[in-house]
Amino acid sequence: RNIQERGITTPTLLLAFSKFPEQESQDVSQAAERMEMSVQVLKQKVCQKHKRSLHPTDLLSADLLTVIANISGCLPYMLPPKCPNNCLANKYRLITGACNNREHPRWGASNTALARWLPPAYEDGLSQPRGWDPSIRYNGAQLPLVRDVTRKIIHVSNEAVTEDNLYSDIIMVWGQYIDHDIAFTPQSTSRTTFLTGMDCQKTCEKQNPCFPIKVTTNDTLSAGMDCLPFYRSSPACGTGDHGILFGNLSVLNPRQQINGLTSFLDASTVYGSSPATENKLRNLTSKEGLLRVNIKYYDNHREYLPFTDQIPSPCAQDSNASVGERIECFMAGDSRSSEVTSLTAMHTLWLREHNRLARALKSINRHWTAETVYQEARKIVGALHQIITLRDYIPKIIGPDAFNLYIGLYTGYDPTMNPTVSNIFSTAAFRFGHATIQPIVRRLNAQYLEDPELPNLHLHEVFFSPWRIIKEGGLDPLLRGLLAHSAKLQAQDQLLNEELTEKLFVLSNNGSLDLASLNLQRGRDHGLPGYNDWREFCGLPKLETQDDLNTVITNKNVTTKIMELYHNPSNIDVWLGGLVEDFLPSARTGPLFACIIGKQMKALRDGDRFWWENDNIFTEDQKHELRKHSLSRVICDNTGISEVPADAFQLGKFPQDFKHCDDIPGMNLEVWKEVYQEEEICGTPKTVENGDYVYCSEFGNSTVTYSCKYGFHLQGEEQLTCTCKGWNVEAPVCTDINECENEINPPCSPSAKCINTKGSYKCLSTDPYKLAEVRRTCIGNACEPTV
C-alpha cells in the first residue's frame, strides 16, 4: 500500500515485495496468524481472571479450539490433500508437490511446515524468538545484537574481498536459484502489530509480528531510529500456542514456519508451486505447451520473462527513460526473480529452455496435445535441475568425502524418507552462499572482454532493476561475466561484502538493509538451536572454549571476536558458526554445513518418487541422453553465446579453457519420439472446451486423462479407457468455478463486490489501495485478480 500510495520504494518494502506470498500461501499465513492471536488473547484473558499461569490445555477445550481453528480458516490446511487416483498420478508430479508420497501426501508439498531436525530453542518454549527478552541469559551471557555481529565479524569492504581461484561466479547464482526452487518462507502478511496496530516500520517495540533489529546510535543504517524493521515469518497452522489442537492435547507443538514452495528439486522456479501461479505462467492458447513470454521486449529475437501484473511494481526505473515508460518487475515461478540481474538471467534461461524443448517435442510428436507437450517438457526441465545440482554443484560445495558420507550412490526411491526441506537448511546452512557473492557485476562482450558501453556495476545498482537487462545488452553480457569471472571466496575474515551489509536493496535515499543481520535475526525468529547443538546433531565434537574453536577456525582473530561477543561457543548463532568453519578438503563449506546440506540433498533425492533416476520415470535411453546435458549446453541453446566452459561452474580463462558450443554435448530428443497409432476402435478422444487430455497406458489398456484449465471444474469421469466397444464413458465437461461463492477464503476484500467471470472473477471497489494490498491490479473501479 505504501508503494502504491506514495510511489516510494524503501528497502524494507522491497524485501516485503520479494517475500510476499502467493495467494494460497497468504491465505495459510493469515489463517495461522488469526488462530495464534485468538488463542493468545483468550489465554491472556483467562490468566488475568485466575491471576495465575495456566497450561493452555486447562484454558481451552479441544472443541473450542476446533471452533477457533474453523473460524480462523486454519482447519482446512491441516487436512490431508485429496490425491488423484488416475493413470497420470504415476507419470507427472503435481504442481503443489502433494501426493508424491502416497502414505504421507503432505511431505514436500507447498504451504506446509518446514521440517524440524532438532527441537526449536524458543525462549518461552513455544514461539518467542531467541533474543526477544534481553534479561534472559545464555550460559551466563546476553546474546549479542545481530547488527554488532555483522559490523565486528561479518562485514568486509568491497575492495578487500578475495577471489575464488577454482569456481566461477555462476556457481553462486546457481546456489541462489536452486535455493529459490526448494524454499520460500513467507513473512507475516501484516505490517502492523496484531494487538496495538503499530506500524512495524515506525516502532522499535517487540510485538508480533515486529521483531526489530536493534542498532547503536552511530549506525549508518539507523536513519535516526534505534532499530531496523524486521517482520517475523508467518507461523504454520497447528503450531505455537495453538498446536495443542492437532495431536495429543497435553503436548504443545512449538511455532513452526511455512515453506510456500514445494520442497522438491522440480523447477518450481520455472512453473510455480500452486495451480494459480502455474496458470499465470502458461500460454494456454499455444498448441505447443509453451510458457508465457514478454510481448513488448525481445533479446535479439529471444524471449524475456513476462512482466508481473502487479502494476506499478516496485522495481527501479531507468532515470533516462522517456515520460510514462516503465519496465516492471518480471514474473516467474518464484516471486524473487527480479531481486538481482544474475538471478533474473537464470530464470530467463530456463523459460527459454522450456519453450525450446516444447517446440522440439511437438515437432517430433505431432499427435501430442498441448498438455502432453507441456508436462513432458516440464519433466525434462525438472530432471536437468536435479542433474546439474547433484552431479555438478553439490560435490563442489560439500566436497567428495562429505558427498559419499551423507549422500552416496542412488539406490532408488525410499518411501520412508521425508523430503521436506528442514528449517536449519533453509534458514542457515544453505545461506552459506551469501558469503560467495561478488560486490561487482561484470558484463563482457563476445570476446569476453570488458565493454566500455556496458561498464561494471556495483551490486546495489542491479537490485530490482529489470530495465538493465532489457536496455543494457540482454542476457549474453551478464552470462559471459558470470562464466569468465570468479566467485568471491568465503574467507573467515571476509564474509559478506558491504553491498550486502550496508546497501541491500537500496534504490534511492530511503535507507538500506543488512543481509547478515537479517539472516541472524531470522535464525532467532525461527528458534534455531545454537551452534553446538547442531555440531552434536552431526556427530561433531562439542566446542567449549576458544581453544576448542581454534581447532575448527584457523583464524584466531575471528575466534577472539566471536568469543568477545558470544562468550560461549554454545551461544553462537548457527549460521555464523557454520560459515566460519575451515573448509573440508575440495569443498567450499566446513563440516557442519556439509553435514546439513548433504543430509538435505539425500532426503530431496531419495524421498522423491519422481526423481529422474527412479524406475519408470524415464526410459533407459532417455536417461542416457539426459546425462549428456549440462548448464553449459543450456546456455549454448538459449543465448547468442558461442563459446563456454565444458563445466560452467569451473573457473577458466578465455579462450584456452572454453569450448565452442558445437563441441558441448547435449541430449538427442529423438528418444522421446512415440510411434502413434490411432485407436482403430475408439478413435481420437473428444476435445473438451477449457480443458485438455493426456494419453496414458495402464494395465495394458489405452487411457486418456482429462484436466480443466485453472478456474474451471471437471464434471464427469476424468479418465477414459479404450475397450472393445469404444471409450468406456463419455468425455467430461469443464464448467466455470464461481470463486465468489468461496466463503472460507473470499477472493475479494469485504469492501469490494465480487463479480464472477468465465474462469476468473473481478473485485469491484472504490478503494484501489485496499485491493493492491492483496495483489490485485485495479483498472478504474474494476480490479482483476493477479493470482
Image: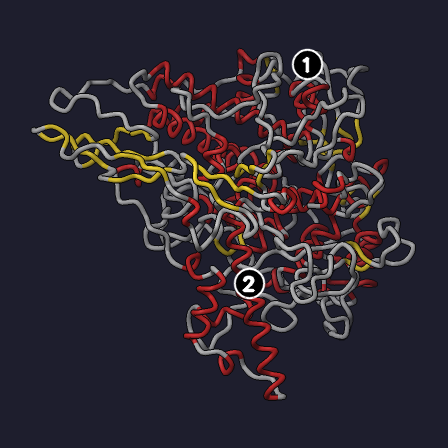
Q: In the rendered view, tell whether residue 247 sits above or below residue 526.
A: below
Q: How many marks?
A: 2
What is the three-letter code of the residue carrying label 1? Pro
Q: CA distance from mark 1 to mark 2?
A: 59 Å
Residue identified by numbered label 1:
655
Residue 668, percent from left and from top: 40, 17
Residue 437, percent from left and from top: 72, 37
Callout 2: helix, strand or loop? helix
Q: Quadrant of residue 777?
A: top right
Q: Residue at the location (50% across, 61% down)? A: 237
Q: In the rendered view, tell whether residue 707 sits above or below residue 372.
A: below
> Which residue, as the protein is rendered here, is positioned at the far right?
218
Q: Residue at the location (55% across, 18% down)? A: 638
Q: Which mark is residue 34?
A: 2
Residue 99, percent from left and from top: 36, 48
Q: Answer with mark 1 or mark 2, whichever residue precedes in sequence.
A: 2
